[in-house]
């Protein structure tokens, strides 16, 4: 990988976080679960990747999310959820988990207004104080004061009853995940310890009953036990997380977009070391212990587990398809045509077509990313009719 090394300030920042993690490892008796390491690396107050002030999204950051490419993604999502918001009436709310740069909120709000489906409140649940301020400033500059007044940042899930739409784009992949390995038929959990030079090293300990039971559940559904030495990720807390973030959601819908696989592909015998990786300046990094605090750490989503979690939360499964199919089924062609007619130049029209390619081509985001929806007391309409993949779950 050929990338520039971090500058002196970034290196010093990383060193401070490494010391914090080392101290926790020592205090825990020499090792901490991998999910705890990932939590600290991403979310330690003031030091974690998502908690500190460096750019994360777009060309100046480490990766590009769909909303950073332009407005087409958010407009298609708005088309998908507008029928739900209209069914719920004037008190409907929209909750976005993790607001990124604020680009999705800007584009979605503007298009929901044109569809006469603007919610009474557009709430953003953002754990990073730094990102929250960036989102606030972004939207303050781009929305009129009356519309901006409908946007609210939350400190936690809405506990009282609310009706509306919960939306999360590239959120589940950033949840601190457990790692497991099979040794002579027994389930072990991956821990992080210190190597002889003070760096981080992999360690293993017998898995606790929750993780062990979750691994056995996956094995039973896969019709075969994992081979010795097989290693991967698993989120046994996913059902609890879904119920926590939805809070008091009564009637409404949940929509998740992320990269991942159905369970049979996620835990394929050929994927013997899981999906864990890091992103640093638009490069995939295999060493998740490198540049701690300066690189994103992520794992793909098990969409079968997400389907189980959503239905266990009391919602009906609404659909599952690739991102390309979801966008095409929710008006991508029409949105592109509308924007091309307003484009001021051929260069702008070319940029729009490039945006569509990034969103839909299999080698880009089109097939690697998938969309999954859940509904209660409402109908999504045609949101998932194009390219249904639920048979693969």
Image (spheres, rainbow, N blue to C red):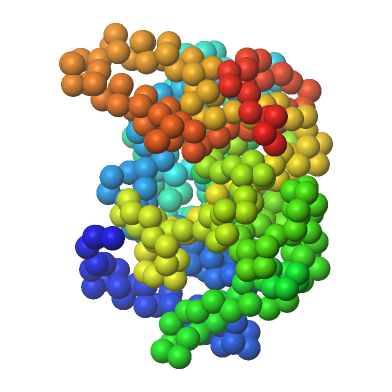
- Report the front residue among 147 and 32: 32
Q: Is residue 122 above or below residue 208?
A: above
Q: Position of residue 249 (x, y in %)?
A: 73, 36
- Is residue 165 toward the left or the right of residue 6 in the image? right
- Residue 373, by quadrant, is top right
Where is residue 342 drawn, in percent x and y? 28, 11
User: Residue at horizontal 37%, vertical 43%?
Assistant: 64
Residue 156 visible in the displayed image: no
Quadrant holding the N terminus: bottom left
Q: Quadrant of the C terminus?
A: top right
Left or right of 121, for residue 91: right
Q: Is residue 213 above or below residue 325?
A: below
Decide if residue 376 is on the left or right side of residue 344. Answer: right
Residue 391 drawn at (x, y percent): 70, 29
Which residue sits at x=22%, y=63%?
Answer: 4
Nearest the camera: 119 or 387? Answer: 387
Residue at 32% in and 51% down: 282
Decide if residue 276 is in sight here: yes
Q: Position of residue 212 (x, y in %)?
A: 77, 65
Question: Residue placed at 58% from the left, 32% from the top?
Answer: 371
- Which residue is situated farthest in the bottom direction here? 196
Query: How many tags in the picture?
Result: 0
Establish if 15 lies above or below 132.
Answer: below
Q: Nearer the viewer, residue 299 or 339?
A: 299
């Amino acid at each position: 990988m050929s990338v520039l090394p971090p500058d002196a300030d970034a290196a010093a920042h990383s060193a401070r976080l490494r010391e914090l993690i080392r101290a926790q490892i020592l205090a825990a008796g020499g090792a901490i679960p991998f999910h705890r390491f990932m939590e600290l690396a991403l979310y330690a107050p003031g030091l974690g990747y998502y908690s500190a002030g460096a750019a994360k999204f777009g060309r100046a950051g480490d990766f590009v999310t769909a909303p950073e490419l332009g407005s087409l993604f958010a407009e298609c999502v708005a088309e998908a959820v507008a029928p739900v918001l209209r069914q719920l009436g004037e008190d409907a709310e929209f909750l976005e988990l993790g607001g990124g740069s604020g680009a999705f909120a800007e584009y979605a709000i503007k298009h929901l207004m044109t569809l006469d489906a603007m919610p009474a409140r557009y709430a953003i649940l953002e754990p990073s104080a730094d990102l929250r301020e960036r989102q606030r400033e972004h939207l303050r500059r781009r929305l009129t004061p009356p519309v901006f007044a409908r946007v609210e940042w939350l400190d936690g899930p809405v506990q009282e009853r609310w009706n509306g739409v919960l939306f999360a784009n590239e959120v589940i992949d950033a949840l601190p995940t457990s790692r497991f390995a099979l040794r002579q038929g027994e389930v072990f959990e991956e821990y992080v310890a210190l190597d002889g030079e003070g760096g981080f090293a992999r360690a293993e300990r017998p898995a606790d009953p929750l993780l062990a039971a979750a691994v056995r559940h996956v094995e039973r559904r896969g019709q075969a036990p994992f081979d010795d030495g097989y290693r991967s990720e698993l989120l046994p807390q996913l059902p609890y997380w879904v119920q926590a973030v939805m809070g008091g959601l009564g009637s409404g819908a949940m929509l998740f977009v992320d990269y991942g696989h159905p369970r049979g592909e996620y835990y394929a015998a050929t994927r013997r070391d899981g999906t864990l990786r890091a992103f640093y300046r638009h490069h995939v990094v295999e060493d998740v212990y490198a540049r701690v605090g300066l690189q994103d750490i992520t794992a793909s989503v098990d969409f079968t587990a997400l389907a189980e979690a959503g239905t266990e939360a009391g919602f009906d499964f609404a659909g599952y398809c690739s991102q390309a199919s979801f966008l095409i089924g929710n008006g991508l062609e029409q949105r592109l045509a509308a924007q091309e007619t307003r484009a001021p130049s051929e260069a702008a029209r070319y940029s729009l077509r490039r945006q569509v390619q990034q969103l839909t081509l299999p080698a880009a985001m089109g097939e690697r990313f998938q969309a999954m929806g859940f509904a209660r007391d409402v109908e999504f309409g045609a949101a998932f009719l194009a390219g249904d993949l639920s048979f693969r779950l």
